[in-house]
Image (tube, rainbow, N blue to C red):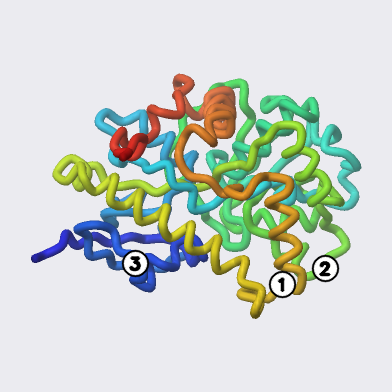
Amino acid sequence: MSRLRLTFACGDYDRTRALEEGTVRPDGIELTYLRLPVEETFFRMMRHQEFEVAEMSLSSYVLSLRNDPSPFVALPVYTSRMFRHGALYCHADSGITTPEDLRGKRIGTPEYQLTACVWMRGILADRHDVPVDSVSYFTGGQETPGRIEKAGVDLPDSLRISRIPEDRTLAQMLAEGEIDALCTPRVPSPFTAGDPRVRRVFPDVVAAEKEYYAATGIFPVMHVVVIRRDVYDRHRWVAQSLYKALLSAKDAAYDTLYDTSALRFMLPWLTPQLEEARELMGRDYWSYGVEGNRETLATFLRYHHEQGLSARRWEPEELFAPESLEAAVI
């Protein structure tokens, strides 16, 4: 009996590896897994809708909802979650010693709409007295000139946003003091190279992120999984099949991560770090679905709206295929 052939573009993750290897197979689906860098997946899906199923930036997905009908339907599967206090860098002579010092500064960001940057702008506004309109933003390529917003944005006039020169990069401008700070999901090359002119805004990132989680209970969602609208409209059952499979793949990753016979990843204290995470955040700290993540999703959607990226404030349930929000019980 033939199975529906779908292509799934996604990153290289322990939580999706069972799908890539074929040890977990979605009901009724023959899945071709394309392991791609996230920037390439997002760009190709947003600009050309090349894949039937893909990992997608949460911010870009919410932006796509302004279309009627929207081109994608999401599943409450969070292929990437990450605290982002470590995404803020500053020039050593910028006068920034605390996050509050970012007020009035020049902050680079590869794209204004990046999910990591939406989160950090919201956290800075909520917890560090840095309103979104209190800084000047500069967008462009971080390491290579010419990056553009993959999803068009229509922002309020109260925001000061400029494109950097076409022959410059944000990494260069940060190192040379042409911008005061940089908010980016990828570590900038001057920091990686040990350039003393560049440092993190939060010097003890782990402590800041643990304090944030203790105060809010939020483990930020970065990426979701989306189904192309035409595929979803023709085969509504695909949403539940994919959701079940992705959930099974994640649960399998939990099990293998806690195998102490040999370290699965090159982290010397992987096991105690895992145990610490479970103690702080619960055993299912990387949960899927809406209910266990309602406050996290609602906070992001508030930030997205407050930062001028969405015309109205969406509710968490509105983001996802209804078939993925409930399941049969016996």
State the count of labels: 3
Classify mark 3: residues with Cα within 10 Å, few (<14), some (14-19) or many (20+).
many
Q: Nearer the viewer, residue 231 or 26?
A: 26
Residue labelled with disc 1: 267
**Mark 3 to mark 1: distance in Å?**
27 Å
Marks 3 and 2 close (CB-CB < 8 Å): no
For marks 1 and 2, the one nearer the N-term is 2
Q: Is residue 39 visible?
A: no
Residue 139 position, x and y percent, is 60, 45
For residue 266, side relative to residue 16 (left or right): right
Please indicate, yes or no, whether residue 244 appears anywhere in the rendered image: yes
Q: Earlier in the sequence, mark 3 or mark 1?
A: 3
Q: Is residue 91 shown above or below 98? A: below
Identify the residue position indicated by label 2 in the image. Answer: 194
Q: Which residue is mark 3?
A: 33
Q: Secondary structure at mark 1?
A: loop
Are the residues at dot 3 and dot 1 in contact (C-beta closer than 8 Å)? no
